[in-house]
Amino acid sequence: KLEQYNSIDDAAQLLRRSRNIMVITGAGISTSLGIPDFRSKGTGFYDKVREKGFEDAEEVFEINNFDYDPGKFFSLARDILPNLQRVSPTHAFIRLLQDKDRLQTNYTQNIDNLEALAGIDENRLIQCHGSFATATCRKCKFKVKGTEIFDDIRAERIARCKRCAQEIERKKDAPPPLKRNKSASRNRYSDDDEDEDDDIPEPGVMKPDITFFGEALPTTFFDRFTQRDAQQTDLVIVIGTSLKVAPVSEMPNYLPHPIPHIYISKEPIAHVNFDIQLLGNCDDVVFELARRAGWDLKHEMIPVG
Ligand code: OAD
Ligand code: ZN
């Protein structure tokens, strides 16, 4: 790279001179609100899952596993259900970048929807791992508002599809199909109904539209990132993510090399190269960054812990 940056003052300078800032976020920007991240030792969601006796914690978000045993997800998901009505200083910082017309796109891996609450424009936000905003039937693809299955999640009960259930009821009420009638010719009705089998039909399971391992990310993610943002960005700031999950983990290295890369998190990162690493509680770091950039980040500090 042409220039060397290493201090928080360099980072503040970069902020001031950049007009197209890409912000990539993870669970660490919401922990000050009491929402657990995934991989922090002791406090992360995956350690909590392990405490409950599930050895391979990430299996909770594996799509094959969900289809095989949805009860597992529904017994654990209440802990990550978005229910908060406040945002962290780091969300406020991203909003500040937007207000200064410097935010290109916030790519978030978070499913807590707090970016929207912070007022990040829909057209500057990509929820890389989807969200709880909607849920879809695994059987018939019927889509509902996410809130419709929140009661099930809170009750640790598998959410079932209303449309499938109606369809099953309708078939129950319908007169028996003609082919059941022994007097009818066997070959006359060729479009056999598959639900004719003896097994009891069950409504499909509703899955929140969060991206599970084994599922594709939203197409808007790839299109926008590769076709547009990667070419136009002038600074990338990665906040509160361990960058352990692809393809988001591959975004920083995909960007043109001269683009300055800043990493803000509690722990240093070794497997991805950053120009500046600002380590600490991200809420404190962004306050200090804004201050040194000469900006006023207005947000009441929320006590951690
Ligand atoms: P991780 O838990 O892997 O990483 C969170 C990072 O934030 C860690 O490096 C923490 O040290 C750091 N951190 C936590 N609190 C912080 C704070 N207050 N200030 C600064 N840093 C802090 O979470 P993600 O990287 O977001 O997928 O995880 C990525 C994906 O893995 C998630 O989207 C999730 C999970 O499987 C799905 O839900 C589909
Ligand atoms: Zn259905």
Image (cartoon, rainbow, N blue to C red):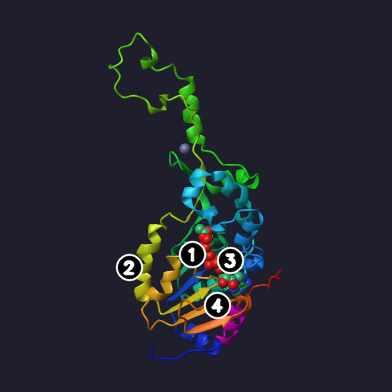
The amino acid on which the numbered mark 1 sits, given as a three-letter code, is Asp
Left or right: residue 132 compared with residue 78: left
Front: mark 1 or 3: 3
The residue where tag 4 is placed is 264
Q: Secondary structure at mark 1?
A: loop
- Relative image position of residue 42 (x, y in whole percent): 66, 66
Percent position of residue 257, x then y: 37, 81
First-in-chain label (1 vs 2): 1
Q: Disc 1 marks which residue? A: 121
The reply to whether discs 2 and 4 touch (Cβ–Cβ < 8 Å) is no
CB of mark 3 near ligand 1 (< 8 Å): yes
Q: Quadrant of the C terminus?
A: bottom right
Does dot 3 land on a helix, a strand or a loop? loop
- Residue found farthest to the top: 183
Q: Give amino acid for label 4.
A: Ile
Between residues 57 and 223, which one lies in front from this camera angle? 57
The image quadrant of residue 40 is: bottom right
- The residue tagged 3 is 39
**Magenta residues?**
285-295
**Does ligand 1 reach within 8 Å of label 4's beta carbon?**
yes
Question: In front: mark 2 or mark 4?
Answer: 4
